[in-house]
Image (tube, rainbow, N blue to C red):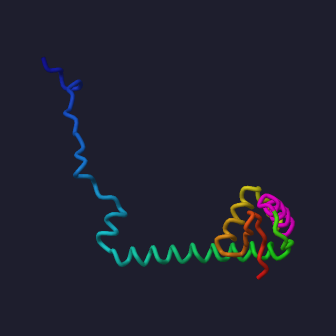
Amino acid sequence: MSQPFPFRRRKSKKSNPIQRTETPWARAWRTAPQRMKEHLDQMNQAKVAKSEETAELVQAILNMLDTEPVAPYKLRDAFHQTWNESYGEQKSKKEAWNLLRLAMRHGKIGKTENGLIYPRKM
């Protein structure tokens, strides 16, 4: 027995996984691939420039520190304290460690055979 109008159920539309709607990013890549490549290149260049700028700030702090090889946590603590005193910007020890890792990627921190690290003066 069918129900009256307000209670009639509609057939549900099942989504077909093969026929998905196109996302805006997929449409942009399909319609203008060259423009999207240029856009990604610009974004990557900006990211690299920001990373290099941050590495220079870290290098300025590393130049103030002693060049003796120390345990990583000691260099992190010294860097953390010097950063907070120099720039007046409160960074956590986690953020300080992330900045030291960035400096490692840029070759501004060396590592000895026994696992100690030291800042390179540049």
Out of 62 and 49, give the one closest to the viewer: 62
Counting from the top left corner in percent of width and height, residue 120 is at 77, 77
Position above or below: 37 against 77? below
Report if residue 114 lies within the magenta region: no
Principal SS element in the magenta part?
Answer: helix
Position above or below: 81 against 121? above
Residue at the far front in the pictured view: 113
Considering the image in quadrants, where does the C terminus appear? bottom right
**Apparent side of residue 8 relative to residue 84 in the rendered image (left or right):** left
Out of 82 and 24, give the one closest to the viewer: 82
Report if residue 73 lies within the magenta region: yes
Out of 119 and 4, give the one closest to the viewer: 119
For residue 88, which quarter of the picture?
bottom right
Considering the image in quadrants, where does the N terminus appear? top left
Residue at the far bottom in the pictured view: 122
**Apparent side of residue 41 relative to residue 80 in the rendered image (left or right):** left
Counting from the top left corner in percent of width and height, residue 45 is at 54, 77
Residue at 51 percent of width and 74 percent of height: 44
Counting from the top left corner in percent of width and height, residue 106 is at 65, 75
Magenta span covers which residues?
Answer: 71-86
